Amino acid sequence: MPHRKKLVVFTGAGMSAESGIKTFRDAGGLWEQYRIEDVATFEAWSTNQAMVLDFYNQRRKQVMEASPNAAHLMIAELQKKFDVQVITQNVDDLHERAGSKKVLHLHGEIMKSRSTVDDKLIYSLKGWELNAGDVCERGSQLRPHIVWFGELVPEMDKAIALAQHADFFVVIGTSLNVYPAAGVINFVPAFTPTWLLDPGDFNLDYIRELKHIKKTAVSGAEDLRKQLLKHS
């Protein structure tokens, strides 16, 4: 079997928006009327654990009710032609449910919980609820397996290594302004063909030369697929 080129796909909130999953940025810094500081920081967890648990329970319920969209499915389909690696800023599991086999979550996974005393103790959740009194095997309260604002991004080194070895690099649904995750593109080799699929009007020429498909993830998925297959 011939060697397949490595396609790295970096996705953000715009990837899942068309599946009905809302984002902070869409709501002007609010998420379902919550301020980021009140639900997505360790300080919030320390001061109002019940509200944080409820917030993520509602987000988890929303994710479970959502379905992968045409862009998720297109990326999974490209596995037939490329060695596809997804790096996502999203915490939902829509890439996996669409069939993508290699998915690296930079900001955590909402369908998992983890120990508050040992970061290595991570558990898959069967349903949408994580409640006070749900504990790890060491007896400590479980928290959402989410990288909160102000916390380190533990998978950054893996993401950088993947970007450095990309034969093709695609960015979908992100304006690349949430750091440190957005910095991943800086590690893509200068000669690697790069695409941006996003309807935004921002200028990324200062980062690198790229082909910009100014459409949403779903409406531009077929255009992107055709352009990539010309290189397969």
Image: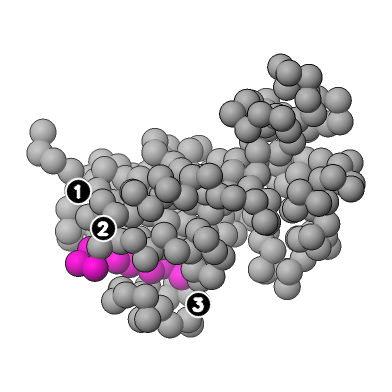
Q: Residue at x 25, y 62 (%)?
A: 189
The reply, left or right, for residue 99 in relation to residue 55 is: left
Quarter-of-image position of residue 130: top right
Residue marked by disc 1: 5
How many numbered circles does the render carry? Answer: 3
Residue of label 2: 168
| Mark 1 and mark 2: Cα distance apart in space | 8 Å
Q: Which residue is mark 3?
A: 200
Q: Position of residue 2 (x, y in %)?
A: 10, 39
Picture layout, residue 167 above or below residue 123: below
Q: 174 above or below 151?
A: below
* Tag of residue 85: none
The segment highlighted magenta reads 190-198
Q: Nearer the viewer, mark 1 or mark 3?
A: 1
Is residue 196 inside the magenta stretch?
yes
Quadrant where the image shows the N terminus: top left
Describe the element under mark 3 as helix, strand or loop.
Answer: loop
Q: Are marks 1 and 2 in contact (CB under 8 Å)?
A: yes
CB atoms of marks 2 and 3 within 8 Å = no
Q: In front: mark 2 or mark 3?
A: 2
| Earlier residue among tags 2 and 3 | 2
Check disc 3 and give the amino acid type: Gly
Mark 1 or mark 3: whose residue is earlier in sequence: 1
The answer to whether residue 67 is seen in the rendering is no
Look at label 2 and name its amino acid: Phe
Q: Compute the Cα span from label 2 to label 3.
A: 21 Å
Secondary structure of the residue carrying numbered label 2 = strand
**x and y percent of residue 191 in the render?**
20, 67
